C-alpha cells in the first residue's frame, strides 16, 4: 500500500510521488529522483523542514525540538526525513524544483474535442495514454505549447483527469496565438504538448465555508475543484459567484447545474456586467457578494479571472473590513 504525495516547489512546479507504508517522505522522494534538501537525516538539523498543506501523517518520534518546535508542528510544519504519510498528502517544499534536481513533467496528447461554446469561449479536451499518469491538484494549470510555434500558454484544468483525458475552458482573444490556432486550425487528432502541473492555486482541505469567485474563463479551475468536491463531499457550505462581461460569455451553466445537483450544500449565481444584458442578474461579482458569504471572516475565499477583475474583487473584500481566514487567487495574466 502506498500514498500519493504532491510536492509543491517554490517555483510553482508540482511533482507527485508514491510513499510506501512506513517510508519517510524524503526517502520516497529520493527513490523517485527528487532530492528534498537534507542534512542529518536524523531529525536533528531541520534542513528538511517543509509544510504539510493537507493529509494525515505521523511526524516521527526521533526529532529534537531545535529541528521542529511543538508550535511549528502544530502549524503544519514537518521534517520530511521523519514524516510518514498515513493518507495522500500535499507538502510545500521551500526550495525550487531545480535545487531538488527535478523539473516539470512533459506530456504528449491529442486533441479529442475542440468546440466553440460562444464567440468568446472555446472548450478544448485532449487525451493520451501518457495523460493517464498525469496527476494534479484541482485548480492547477499546465503550459500548453501552441502547435506550429515555440510558444506556450498557461491554462487551468477545467476537469479532473479521467481515462487519460483533461479539458480546458479558453477565452478566444481575437488575434491571439493560441486563440487563432484553436478557432482556425485545430482539429481532433492534432497532437499537443503540455508541461506541468503548476501553481499554488488549488483546493485546500475544506475546514470552513468556501466563497468561490470567477471572472470569465476564470471559471475553469472551479469546475475542476467542484468535480473533486462532488467526489469527496463537503460538510461546509460552498457558494460560487460567476461574473462575465456579455451574455454570450456565460457558458457552462448546465455543468454548474449538474454540479449543484451532485453537491448538496453547493449554491451558485451568475451575473453579467454589460448594461445591454438581458440576463436577470446584472452587475459585477462584487455586487453579488452578500455579508453571509463572508461569514464574518470564517470563510476561505478563492478568486480567479483576468487581472483587473482579481484586483477589483480583492480591493472590495479589503474594503469590507473582513479578513477571510484564507484568501487564494489566480490571475489569468497574458503571456509576456
Ligand atoms: C496561471 C494562468 C492560468 C491561465 N488559465 C487560463 C484558462 O484556464 N483559460 C483562459 O482562457 N486563459 C487562461 N490564462 C491566460 C492564457 O494563458 C492566455 O494568456 C490567453 O489564452 C491568451 O492567449 P493567446 O495565445 O490566444 O493570445 P496572445 O497571443 O497571448 O495575446 C494576443 C494579444 O491579446 C492580449 N491578450 C491576451 N489575453 C488577453 C485577455 N484575456 N484580454 C485582453 N487581451 C488579452 C495580449 O496582451 C496580446 O496583445 C491563464 C494565464 C495564467 C498566467
Ligand atoms: S535532515 Fe536533518 S532534520 Fe531532517
Image (spheres, rainbow, N blue to C red):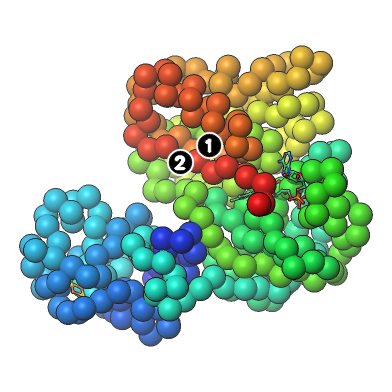
Residue 302: x %, y % from top left: 49, 38
Residue bearing the label numbered 2: 328
| Mark carried by residue 303 | 1
The answer as to whether callout 2 falls within 8 Å of ligand 1 is no
Residue 260, compared with residue 220, is above or below; it is: above
| Element at label 1 | strand
**Residue at 91 percent of width and 59 percent of height:** 185
Residue 56 rendering spot, x and y as whole percentages: 30, 60
Dots 1 and 2: beta carbons under 8 Å? Answer: yes
Q: Residue at x 35, y 27 (%)?
A: 323
**Farthest-out residue, left:** 65
Residue at horizontal 69 percent and vertical 36 percent from the top: 216
Q: Residues within 10 Å of mark 2 (few under 14, many from 20)?
A: some
| Count of numbered marks | 2
The image position of residue 197, as x and y in percent, is 56, 63
* Residue 223: x %, y % from top left: 62, 45
The circle drawn on residue 274 is none
Q: Earlier in the sequence, mark 1 or mark 2?
A: 1
Amino acid at each position: 500500500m502506498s500514498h500519493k504525495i504532491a510536492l509543491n516547489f517554490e517555483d510553482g512546479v508540482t511533482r507527485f510521488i508514491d510513499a510506501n507504508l512506513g517510508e519517510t517522505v524524503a526517502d520516497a522522494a529520493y527513490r523517485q529522483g527528487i532530492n528534498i534538501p537534507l542534512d542529518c537525516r536524523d531529525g536533528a538539523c531541520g534542513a528538511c523542514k517543509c509544510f504539510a498543506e493537507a493529509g494525515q501523517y505521523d511526524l516521527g518520534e526521533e526529532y529534537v525540538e531545535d529541528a521542529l518546535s511543538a508550535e511549528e508542528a502544530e502549524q503544519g510544519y514537518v521534517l520530511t526525513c521523519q514524516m510518514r504519510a498515513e493518507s495522500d498528502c500535499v507538502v510545500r517544499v521551500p526550495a525550487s524544483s531545480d535545487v531538488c534536481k527535478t523539473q516539470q513533467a512533459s506530456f504528449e496528447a491529442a486533441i479529442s474535442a475542440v468546440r466553440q461554446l460562444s464567440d468568446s469561449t472555446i472548450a478544448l479536451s485532449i487525451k493520451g495514454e501518457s495523460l493517464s499518469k498525469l496527476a494534479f491538484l484541482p485548480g492547477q494549470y499546465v503550459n500548453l505549447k501552441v502547435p506550429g510555434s515555440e510558444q506556450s500558454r498557461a491554462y487551468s484544468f477545467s476537469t479532473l483527469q479521467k481515462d487519460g483525458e483533461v479539458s480546458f475552458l479558453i477565452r478566444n482573444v481575437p488575434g491571439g496565438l493560441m486563440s487563432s490556432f484553436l478557432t482556425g486550425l485545430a482539429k481532433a487528432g492534432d497532437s499537443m504538448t503540455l508541461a506541468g502541473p503548476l501553481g499554488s492555486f488549488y483546493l485546500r482541505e475544506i475546514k470552513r465555508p468556501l466563497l468561490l469567485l470567477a471572472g470569465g474563463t476564470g471559471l475553469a479551475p472551479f469546475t475542476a475543484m467542484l468535480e473533486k468536491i462532488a467526489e469527496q463531499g463537503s460538510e461546509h457550505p460552498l457558494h460560487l459567484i460567476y461574473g462575465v462581461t456579455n451574455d454570450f460569455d456565460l457558458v457552462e451553466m448546465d455543468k454548474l447545474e449538474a454540479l449543484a445537483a451532485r453537491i448538496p450544500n453547493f449554491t451558485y449565481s451568475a451575473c453579467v456586467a454589460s448594461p445591454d444584458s438581458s440576463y436577470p442578474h446584472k452587475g459585477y461579482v462584487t455586487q453579488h457578494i452578500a455579508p453571509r458569504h463572508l461569514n464574518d471572516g470564517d470563510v476561505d475565499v478563492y478568486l480567479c479571472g483576468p487581472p483587473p477583475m482579481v484586483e477589483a474583487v480583492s480591493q472590495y473584500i479589503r474594503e469590507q473590513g473582513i479578513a477571510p481566514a484564507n484568501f487564494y487567487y489566480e490571475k489569468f495574466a497574458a503571456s509576456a
